[in-house]
Image: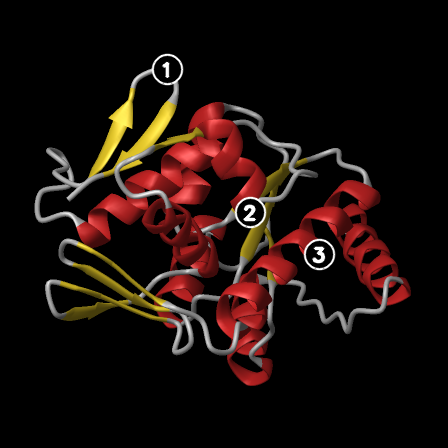
Amino acid sequence: MEEEEALRRALCDQLEREGFDALAAGDGVGALQLFRQRSPVLVILDLQLPGINGLDLCHAIRQESAVPIVILTARDAEADKVAGLEAGADDYVTKPFSMRELVTRVRAHLRRAGVSAGAPGGPILVAGPIHMDMQRHEVHVRGRPIELTPKEFALLEAFLLRQGKLATREVLISEVWGSEYFGDTRTLDVHVRRLRSKIEEDPQRPRHLKTVRGLGYKLQV
C-alpha cells in the first residue's frame, strides 16, 4: 500500500510539473466517485487499485464516457493487456515504467482527442453505411448514432480517408497513436475489433473493415 501511495504521489507531482492538473484516488470506489464529480479529460488507471476490480472500473468508466483511458499494470502477459483494451482502455503501460514515457503517452492521447473533437469546419466523410461529421464529432452507421472513444474516432477517420486503399499497421499507429508510441501492434488489433463491433452487422464476418494479412487493414464498401 505504501508503495502504491508513493507511486500515486510521484505520478501526480510529475504531471503537475508538466503543467497538468492531477487528482488521485486510493481505491476503486473513490476513483469512480472522483471521475463522476470532476469529469477528467484523461484517466490513468492502475489495475491493482483496491476496492473495485481494475477491469470492472475501466469498463464502468467507458460505459459513461469516451475519455481516453491509460491503464497501468504490473502484468506483462499479452492476455492481461488485451483484457484491459477490451474493457475499454485506449493504451497500457507496464510497470516498471519511466515517467517520461507515461507523460509522452498522456500528451499524445490528449492531443489526438483534442484534434478529433475540436477541428472546426471539418468535413463530412461517407463510406457505404458509415457517415462521419467531423465538426460535430458524430458518427452514424445505417442511420443509427454510435458512440466512439477518441481513439476509435481517429482510427475510423483514418480508414474513411483511405477507403478502398490499404492502411498499413505502421501508418495507422503513427497517425492515431503518434510517432512516439512505444507499444506493440496488438493495441491496434484490439481497437479494430472494437470498431468492427460498432460498424459491422456481423463483426465475425466483416463486410467493410477487412484485414489484409501481414500488412494492415482496408475499409471497403
Q: Pinpoint residue 73: horizontal percent, then vertical percent.
A: 60, 39
Earlier in the chain: of badge 3 and badge 1, it is 3
Residue flagged by tag 1: what amino acid is it?
Gly
Amino acid type, residue under disc 2 in the picture: Leu
In the image, residue 22 lies at what x, y percent?
75, 70
Which residue reaches farthest top?
214
**Residue that carries the numbered disc 1 in the rendered image:** 214
The residue beneath circle 2 is: 47
Q: Is residue 53 left or right of residue 156?
A: right
Q: Amino acid at mark 3?
A: Arg
Q: Nearer the viewer, mark 1 or mark 2?
A: 1
SS category of the residue bearing label 2: loop
Which comes before the other along the chain, label 3 or label 2? 2
Q: Image point 45% across, 54% down: which residue?
A: 154
Compared with residue 40, is residue 82 higher up or lower down, i.e. above or below? above
Residue at 83 percent across and 44 percent down: it is 100
Q: Are marks 3 and 1 in contact (CB under 8 Å)?
A: no
State which tag comes first along the sequence, 1 or 2. Answer: 2
> Of circles 3 and 1, which is in front?
1
Residue nearest the viewer, comparing 114 with 32: 114
Q: Residues within 10 Å of mark 3 (few under 14, many from 20)?
A: some
35 and 166: which is toward the camera: 166
- Could you say which quadrant of the image residue 35 lies in? bottom right
Question: What is the C-alpha distance between the residues marked 3 and 1?
Answer: 30 Å
Residue to which mark 3 is pinned: 107
Name the mark nearer the viewer: 3 or 2: 3
SS category of the residue bearing label 1: loop
Q: Position of residue 133 (x, y in %)?
A: 33, 71
